Amino acid sequence: MEIRKHWPLYLLCLPALVFVLIFSYGPMVGLVMAFQDYKPWLGMTGSRWIGLDNFERIFQYEEATQAIVNTLIIAVIKIVVGIIVPIVMAILLNEIRLAGLKKSIQTLVYLPHFLSWVTIAGIMIDILGLDGGINRIITGWFGSEPIFFLGDPNLFRPTVIVSDLWKNFGFGMIVYLATIAGIDPSFYEASEIDGANRWQQIWHVTLPSMLPMIIVIATLSLGGILDAGFDQIFNLYNPLVYSTGDIIDTYVYRSSLLNGQYGFGTAVGLFKSGISLILIVISYRIAYKFANYKIF
């Protein structure tokens, strides 16, 4: 009865549903490869069944274990700084009273989000390469040895985290600016009557009012704790930084598509997806409990 009454709306949803079924659920048939010694020329029906052997190999290979560790380190730091910096910048930007200056800053910090990682990687290579702009300044002005930002394992993670922050913090700031805009002005008026200065108003009015949204975003970010950003890492890393820069997604790409270990690569990807699903469920439960956030 409900479908018959609102059939035009369901019809509008049909193309999106078909798209999801074909490109999201259809490929899940291939997950059976995670339990096989998959050979392309034999197919999924002819490849030998090996059960959980591929999953056991995840923790036997040093490269796989290191990729998991690298993913956790990079993803956790990205999540933490990706929450703190937008909050701070939103509060500071909200304190600017010149409308023109405020809009100009907003535009400048939003723009990097709309650039692809291919474009940003090219810019970073030009700037941070051994013959890039920064190293020309280091060698020409200061007479020091050039720094291999993208080839030094100790510098690769900070470079990745800072570049990700530069690209995305402006867009993440939008949510917090909208939250600040929705705060009742009478709260500030009451605090001003009580003698609170601007910093005290931020601490006792702005931040507490933003807290529910901060909790929601922080908890929902848990679902991406195993997602360190394939596009970014793939366009920036090289064999010299595998020890600190290789993540689960890039390891799956190399082990399956380049080395032909399709079953093992599928197992690693399925392992990551399973953990992410559990974390997403937990994060939604936490968001509902502490911030009354729910989708349905």
Image: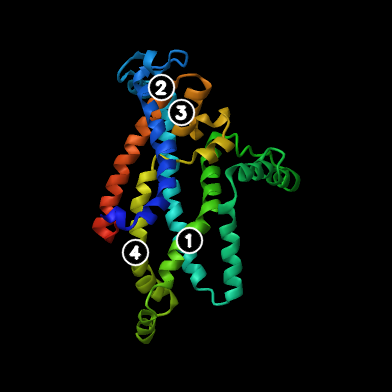
Farthest bottom residue in view: 193
For marks 3 and 1 on the same chain, the one whose residue lies earlier in the sequence:
1
- Residue on which disc 2 sits: 264
On the image, numbered disc 1 is attached to which residue? 173
Q: CA distance from mark 3 to mark 1?
A: 32 Å
Picture residue at 30% right of the left edge, 49% below the top = 283
Residue 211 tag number: 4
Q: Residue at x 52, y 51 (%)?
A: 165
x, y percent for residue 142: 72, 47
Q: Residue type at mark 1?
A: Met
Q: Could you say whether the residue bearing mark 4 is in a helix, strand or loop?
A: helix
- CA gap between label 4 and label 2 equals 42 Å
Determine which residue is flagged by label 3.
Answer: 252
Residue 104 point in image, percent of width and height: 61, 67
Q: Amino acid at mark 4?
A: Leu
Looking at marks 1 and 2 on the same chain, the residue that comes earlier in the sequence is marked by: 1
Q: Position of residue 125 (x, y in %)?
A: 65, 40
